[in-house]
Image (spheres, helix red, strand yellow):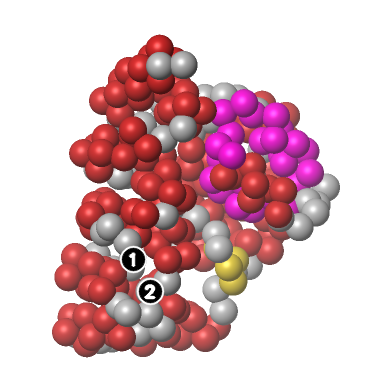
Amino acid sequence: MSEGKDRKTSLDIRTLRALVAMLSSGDEGERKVASRGLERAPAEDIVHHLSDSDLPLEVMEYFARNSSIRSEWVEALRANPSLPDSLRHEIERAPSPHSGPEKNEAAAQGHSVGGTVSDEKLSLAQEIQQLTVGEKIKMALKGDKEARTILLKDTNRQIYMSVLENPGLKESEVEMLTRNTSTNADILRAIGKNREWTSNKNIVKNLVLNSKTPVEVSMRFLPRMSLKDLEFIDKSRNLPSAVRLSARRLILHKKKGR
């Protein structure tokens, strides 16, 4: 029996994760659909999930980095005991949140995680689509930040890996890549092998907390994690079991050494 298309329904965690993935997509249509989905979802369901200690890391990341969306969601996330310190700091630095879904609508009209998708950027994306593989690789090696952002999403490994060799690539961009759960595992592996980048403690932490990071990379950096981070990793259902088990062993070792 139909109950009306505008009727709000219960939002489970799988659906919330799917909406977050769509909101982080480069596809404007997907972002609009996901934005409407969040607007129609019961506010109490979202608040419940955001305060749950088992909340997946990628959902925490999205709401922490878009913490001006709604005040009640921000407060729920702040109350989450599993929220990493790095994300908590991002919330504190963010603008004051709205009390309604206006920010969602703005995101649907052309904003993605990390910034605005302007007409100029869309034009560049269309221009890049017309290039040959060789031309894309050349742009990946020499292009500006806007070009790098687009080419990192290319499906050709030669192209997206070439971006990492671009001399203009900034450490802040690498840090964002390691935080993003949509970053290709090959990219994360390459970042993990770079001594200069892995001297940055935020990059190392992001690598370990990113569910897409290859297990061997995460395991190598686990000993550099703080006790609090290790406890978060141990409880995270979003990370590989081998990583969680190693984190648990390190927790016991650190506590014995006190």
Q: Is residue 175 left or right of residue 12?
A: left
Instruction: Tell me the tag on residue 169.
Output: 2
Q: Viewer-nearest of labels 1 and 2?
A: 2
Q: Which residue is rendered at x = 37% and y = 54% of the image?
A: 199
Q: Is residue 67 left or right of residue 17?
A: right
Q: Which residue is rendered at x = 41% and y = 20% of the image?
A: 254
In the displayed structure, 189 sits above or below 142; it is above
Q: Which residue is rendered at x = 41% and y = 83% of the image?
A: 144
Question: Would you call the spot at circle 2 few (<14 residues within 10 Å), some (14-19), or many (20 or more)?
Answer: some
Q: Which residue is denoted by mark 1 in the rendering?
A: 153
Q: Position of residue 179 (x, y in %)?
A: 44, 51
Label 1: element kind: loop
Label 2: element kind: loop
Q: Which residue is rendered at x = 25% and y = 39% of the image?
A: 220
Q: Is residue 229 left or right of residue 168?
A: right
Q: How many marks?
A: 2
Placement of the N terminus among the 4 image quadrants: top right
- Name the quadrant containing residue 117: bottom right
